[in-house]
Image: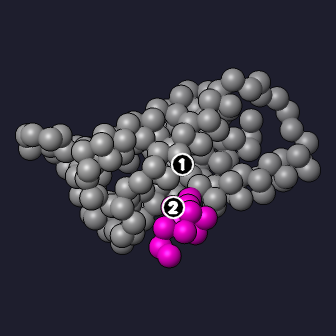
Amino acid sequence: MKERRAVHRAGLQGSALPRLPGRAGGQGHRLARLRVLRPRSGPGLPAAPVAAAVLAGESAAVALLVLGERAGFGLAAAMPAAFATAILLALRRGSAATCRCFGVTAAPLSRAQIVRNLLLIAVAVTGWVMPGGSVELAGAALALVAAAVLAAVLVLFDDLADLLLERNL
């Protein structure tokens, strides 16, 4: 269970840090997220409350996971589920919005972000259903290394998808 908490803490922290006020890309991320959530007609959702809700949700999930609360896994599954839904709706509308989930990038939304979010949901659900227990030091060290590798893969998922799918060639 420790490795699943570590994966989500790293992923959520990597996602939340660029959103903090004063951080490079923070404002750009909020505006990009709004373009994804804007309906076909109407003004869309107000930027400030949506950005605050996303930051609060991700921060709360990290805090709950650090405290060892199972509710952290529920929130860690709900956040990417909402993002995957928003991205799917944007893709169906033909939106040209960019994904700035882990900082500033010019990469347009694609199914790769949906797949990444589904992987995050799978890890969260696994953490939710697996029983907790005591872990030996060697097991904890191995779990943290595995979590760091998986978190890096998830953070760099767009780049890996581009490389493996050869979209840029």
Which residue corresponds to the image point at 83% horizontal and 47% vertical from the top-left? 140
- Look at the picture and state if 54 lies above or below 106: above
Q: Nearer the viewer, residue 69 or 25?
A: 25
Residue 102, horizontal then vertical, whole percent: 46, 60
SS at mark 2?
Answer: helix
- Look at the picture and state if 82 lies above or below 90: above
Quadrant of the rendered image containing residue 104: bottom left
Is residue 158 in the magenta section?
Answer: yes
What amino acid is found at the position of numbered circle 1 in the picture?
Answer: Arg
| Segment colored magenta | 157-169
In the picture provided, is 61 more to the left or to the right than 66? left
Residue 137, horizontal then vertical, whole percent: 89, 48
In the picture provided, is 82 more to the left or to the right than 4? left
Q: Quadrant of the N terminus?
A: top right
Which residue corresponds to the image point at 36% horizontal and 70% vertical from the top-left? 106
Which residue is situated farthest in the bottom direction here?
A: 169
| Disc 2 from disc 1: Cα separation | 8 Å
**Label 1 sits on residue:** 116
Which residue corresponds to the image point at 24% horizontal and 45% vertical from the top-left? 93
**Label 2 sits on residue:** 158
Q: Nearer the viewer, residue 108 or 121?
A: 108
Q: Residues within 10 Å of mark 2 (few under 14, many from 20)?
A: many
What scheme was used to colour the molecule?
one colour
Residue 60, horizontal then vertical, whole percent: 47, 39
- Look at the picture and state if 37 lies above or below 30: above
**Contact? badges 2 and 1 (CB < 8 Å):** yes
